[in-house]
Image (spheres, rainbow, N blue to C red):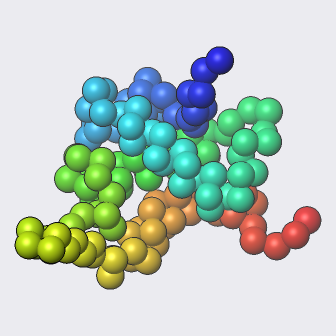
Amino acid sequence: MSSRMNTYATYDFYETSFGGTLVPFDVFDKFNRNATAFIDYITFNRVKGLEDISDEVKLATCNVIEYMYQLTGGTGIDPLQQKASEEVGNYKVSYQHSANKEVETLYYQAAKVYLAPTGLLYRGVK
């Protein structure tokens, strides 16, 4: 049984339909998984229930992928989890968290460009 997560974009879609050139093929899947998880988060998992994934969802995913790639310097390491300081004696570590909402807002804006007219971002009850 495979536990592989379904993602909303393919590298072919990224290159041809989205026109992406920034994210290399060899790291695309990692960013695609993270972007898909973010799309699920902001759409309250509504996309998972769709029979067909619309181009708007795929475009939003690609846009988030590019933002994630740029904001992590291509490493895929969440900038919110990067160490701000570390000591060796009595081992202390602190992480930077000040950018948490700012980064999430950038990702949200990247997705919103394509998802706003779809109703998938609606926060109310239907």
Image coordinates for residue 98, horizontal then vertical, percent: 32, 81
Q: Is residue 51 left or right of residue 66?
A: right
Camera-side residue of 83 and 113? 83
Q: Is residue 103 visible?
A: yes
Q: Is residue 125 left or right of residue 8?
A: right
Residue lying furthest right: 126
Residue at 26% across, 55% down: 72
Q: Is residue 44 above or below residue 53?
A: below
Residue at 8% across, 68% down: 88
Q: Is residue 1 above or below residue 11?
A: above
Quarter that holds the N terminus: top right
Residue at 62% across, 61% down: 42
Quarter that holds the C terminus: bottom right
Image coordinates for residue 28, horizontal then vertical, percent: 36, 34
Camera-side residue of 15 and 25? 25
Camera-side residue of 86 and 22? 86
Residue lying furthest top: 1
Residue lying furthest bottom: 98
- How many numbered callouts? 0
Image coordinates for residue 115, horizontal then vertical, percent: 62, 57
Q: Quadrant of residue 58?
A: top right
Q: Is residue 18 visible?
A: no
Q: Is residue 122 left or right of residue 85?
A: right
Image coordinates for residue 77, horizontal then vertical, percent: 29, 52
Camera-side residue of 3 and 98? 3
Q: Is residue 45 above or below residue 107?
A: above
Residue at 33% across, 77% down: 97
